[in-house]
Image (spheres, rainbow, N blue to C red):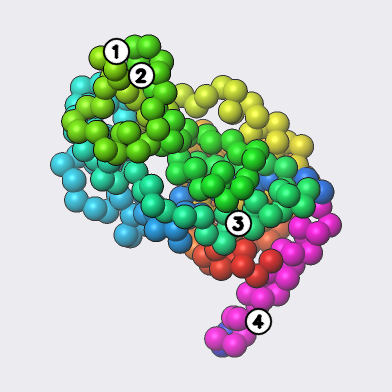
Amino acid sequence: MTVKGNLAAAEEKVKLLKEYVEECSSVVFFGGAGVSTESGIPDFRSTDGLYHQEWNYPPETILSHTFFLNHTEEFYRFYRKKMLCLEAKPNAAHEKLAELEKRGKLTAVVTQNIDGLHQMAGSRCVYELHGSVHRNYCQRCGAFYDARYILESEGVPRCSCGGVVKPDMVLYEEGLDSQVLRGAVNAISRADMLIIGGTSLAVYPAAGLIDYFSGKHLVLINRDATPRDGQADLLIQGNIGEVFRGI
């Protein structure tokens, strides 16, 4: 197919996506790291993502519960440098999703991201499967600390009571929050349209949540192929921000 033909096909797919959105009344968006890459936040699995950058340990090891307990200072050295992107701003995808929620079309965002950009864009119903960098709590007394406190601290961040402050994010070896999980499952199971975007669908149990969808339209938007491409009613391969700009 020619370049012109490819562009025409892509435009037709975006047009069809618009039609799906207009005809549905309960849309849920399920997203991953690819939603935030256009905001300057690197993902984990692309060729320029965190998994392909040099470090003393693999990121999977550093971001594990065991590593946090046994090498807390090294965990925070990585966390400050690679996970805290506090200057990032919402992009077209975040903004369009917030707009669809205001219109009464979108009922929920289910995200694997921990950057808080959906809320910054104005989304209200957001299920953060893996937590958020913007919430941090003392492990001793439960006192709250924001992300700026963690970024500006040195070594292991500590509470005024002396306890170690831990990010409210789900580390490897830890389970998902049961209340967040129930909310996400409920939203997906009630949706008449599920848009999956910017995720490789390789991280479980999060990726398994889409099995609860039994609605009318399953749309998958991602740069690369995923294990669920064959299940989609509409498959769009491209950057999610560009696709959402066309809606």
Residue 19 locus on image (x, y percent): 79, 64
Magenta stretch: includes residue 224: no
**Residue at 40 percent of width and 32 percent of height:** 146
From which residue to which does the magenta span run? 3-24
For residue 138, which numbered disc appears in the image? 2
Between the residue at mark 3 and the residue at mark 4, the CA separation in whole angstroms equals 25 Å
Q: Nearer the viewer, residue 118 or 169?
A: 118
> Is residue 55 visible from the viewing direction of this image?
yes
Instruction: Please state which of the two labelled residues, at mark 1 or mark 4, is closer to the viewer.
Output: 1
Query: Counting residues from the N terminus, which is met first, the one under dot 2 or under dot 1?
Result: 2
Q: Where is residue 132, by image quadrant? A: top left
- Whether 247 is drawn above or below 201: the answer is below
Residue type for callout 2: Cys
Q: Which labelled disc corresponds to residue 8? A: 4
Kindly check if marks 2 and 1 are in contact, taking CB atoms under 8 A apart as contact. Answer: yes
Residue that numbered label 3 is attached to: 95
Residue type, mark 1 in image: Cys
Label 3–label 4 contact, CB within 8 A: no
- Circle 1 crowding by C-alpha within 10 Å: few under 14, some 14–19, many from 20: few
- Look at discs 3 and 4 and give the one toward the viewer: 3
Among the 4 quarters of the image, the one containing residue 73: top left
Depth check, mark 2 against mark 4: the one in front is 2
Q: Earlier in the sequence, mark 3 or mark 2?
A: 3
Amino acid carrying mark 3 in the image: Glu
Report how far apart the C-alphas of labels 3 and 1 lie in the structure. Answer: 40 Å
Residue type at tag 4: Ala
Distance of label 3 from label 2 (alpha carbons): 33 Å
Residue at 52% x, 24% y: name it: 177
